[in-house]
Every structure is written in C-alpha cells, then in structure tokens.
Image (cartoon, rainbow, N blue to C red):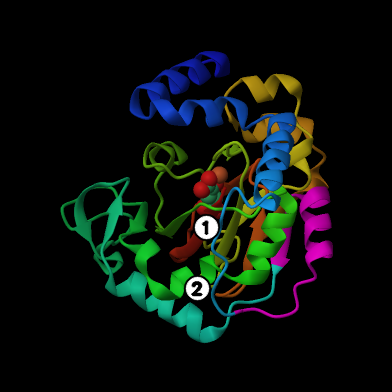
Amino acid sequence: MPSQASFLVGAMNRLRRRPLSYGPYALGRFGLVRRSYGAARGMLQRLGLEKWNQSGPPLVQGIDVRAAVASLREQSFYVVPQLPDEIVSEIRRFATEGLCRRQERPPFFKASDVIDGKLPTGEVAVLADVVGAASNQTIQAVSNERSVVAVIAKYLGYVPTGHHVRLIWSFACDATDEVRLNEGQTVLYHFDVHSYNFAYANYYITDVDARSGAHTMIVGSHTDKPLAWLFGSAMRSDGEIRGHYISDREITLTGPAGFGFIQDSSCYHRALAPVDRARLMLQIRYF
Ligand SMILES: O=C(O)CCC(=O)C(=O)O
Ligand SMILES: [Fe+2]
C-alpha cells in the first residue's frame, strides 16, 4: 500500500479506537508543536499551576544532566549508567515468573511456554508484554529515577507528569518481519509520536547484541527528516532510510543486562529480530 494511503488508513483506525489520541498523534510529530507544548507546560509548572511528584531514591550515579541533554539534542539518545545488578535481577525474576500477553489478547502465558516463537497451542508468540509491570515496585523505582527524570525534564522543558511502562519479551525464532510487524513488533524503521511531547528510557534486562534483539537507530534523525516523511506513514523501508541517511549515522545499541538509554524516539529506530536468544526490555515512555 502506498505510504500516504497506509497513513490515512492507520489514522482512521486510530481515530475509531482512541479518538482522543488523534490530536497528539497528528501534531506531536512536528518540532514546533513539541517545543511550544514544552514551553507552555514548563511555564504552568513554574507558576505552580501544575503539580508533579518527584520521589524515590537515586538508582544510578554520575549523570551529567547538561551533557545528557546535549547528547539528546544532537544525537537523539544518551546512554545512562548501568542499572544496579539487584534491580536487573528483580525485574528479570518478575518477567520470568509473571504472566505475559500478546497485544492484550488472550491467552495469558509464561515466557518459558514460548518455544521457537510459538505457544504450546501452536499460536505465534514473537512479542509479549509482561502483565502488571507498571505496578511492580522495582520498576516504579526505575521509572522515578531522579537523574533520568531530570534529564528528560530539561530536554522536554517540563517535568513529565505521565509515563507508560512496558516490559517486553522479544522471542528468538525465524518468524518473518511481516509476522513480527503484525504482532506489533517494530522491526521496520519508524518514528514514534507518543504525545504532544515525549521521550523514552529503554533498559535491556537481558544481555543484548545484534543477534539477540538489539535496538538500532539513525543518530540525529529526530530533527532531520524529509518534510514529506513527516506527513506520510511513520514507517520507512531499510532502502528508503539508507538512501537518505549516510551509513555511519546508523548505530546498533548493544550492551549487557542493565544497559539503558534515553531516546527522543521521534528519531528513526527499530528493533532487530532476535535470532540467538530472547530479549527482555523495560521501556518507559515519559510525556
Ligand atoms: O523494541 C525496540 O527496540 C524498539 C521499540 C519501539 O520502537 C517502540 O516501542 O516504539
Ligand atoms: Fe518505536
């Protein structure tokens, strides 16, 4: 389907499903909207008209907020100091013992039930969200991590008062990209539009390399997209991306369990399909 048509179909479906999300989705892709929204929210917060809750102990040390914000502005991402081992182990335990679901559809299952990308019933399972992640106290501590929130607040222009949490298994198997896309896995380059303004923090909870589900991205593309691509589908083929951006702007983020990065996910990015072993990633979307 041509990208303009697929954009329209996607927009119509979104409008039917969640009418209130359409404004942010249509407008949050434009830098001017994001900056104006950030400035207005920041002013309301400085006037004390909007309250936020900044609590919780620090989990990581040594973030230089100015350098982190500069990296986000120039490179679209910033690598944060490693999460402590006990935090990583607790999140992995929760995700291993807990129940998962595929795109909120039944059945519930455990990650260990998935073999070669299939449930025991034979149904495809390439991607699954761990249920109840937002209520887990360790995950809440990571979401509220002061210096990460401070970086995002400085970057957005206001302290984010909302965040959505996802703890996501991506299973190793030979499923095609088409199957993975149908299952909601973003294995094609795309930009996100989570709200009028937003930034994500992603933490690997398993060791990740290029064969186990690494995240790849185009450095600096959050402020550097062809105008026409802002109006069409958020997704682009590898050919389009590589035809437009020089190759050394494409990077693959790999690291041991506990590796994390803050990202302006309006840059082009995607997940590689894992081949060797499953990836578990904690994603916090601040807005
Ligand atoms: O799983 C990944 O590495 C990318 C996730 C992503 O693109 C998204 O959640 O929008
Ligand atoms: Fe994305």
Count of numbered tags: 2
Q: What segment is highlighted magenta in the picture?
A: 58-79
For residue 274, say whether it is visible: yes
Q: Which mark is residue 284?
A: 1
Dot 2 corresponds to which residue? 141
Sequence order check, earlier mark of 2 and 1:
2
Q: Which mark is residue 24?
A: none
In the displayed structure, would residue 79 be above or below residue 244? below
Residue at 48% x, 59% y is: 275
Q: Position of residue 41 (x, y in %)?
A: 65, 43
For residue 254, say whether it is visible: no
Q: Does the closest atom of ligand 1 sit within 8 Å of the Cβ of label 1? A: no
User: How far apart are the two marked residues, 2 and 1, measured between alpha carbons?
Assistant: 12 Å
Q: Quadrant of residue 280?
A: bottom left
Outermost residue, left direction? 121
Q: Crowding near pointer 2: few (<14 within 10 Å), some, many (20+)?
A: some
Residue at 79% x, 45% y is: 220
Q: What amino acid is labelled 1 in the image?
A: Ile
Q: Position of residue 211 (x, y in %)?
A: 55, 61
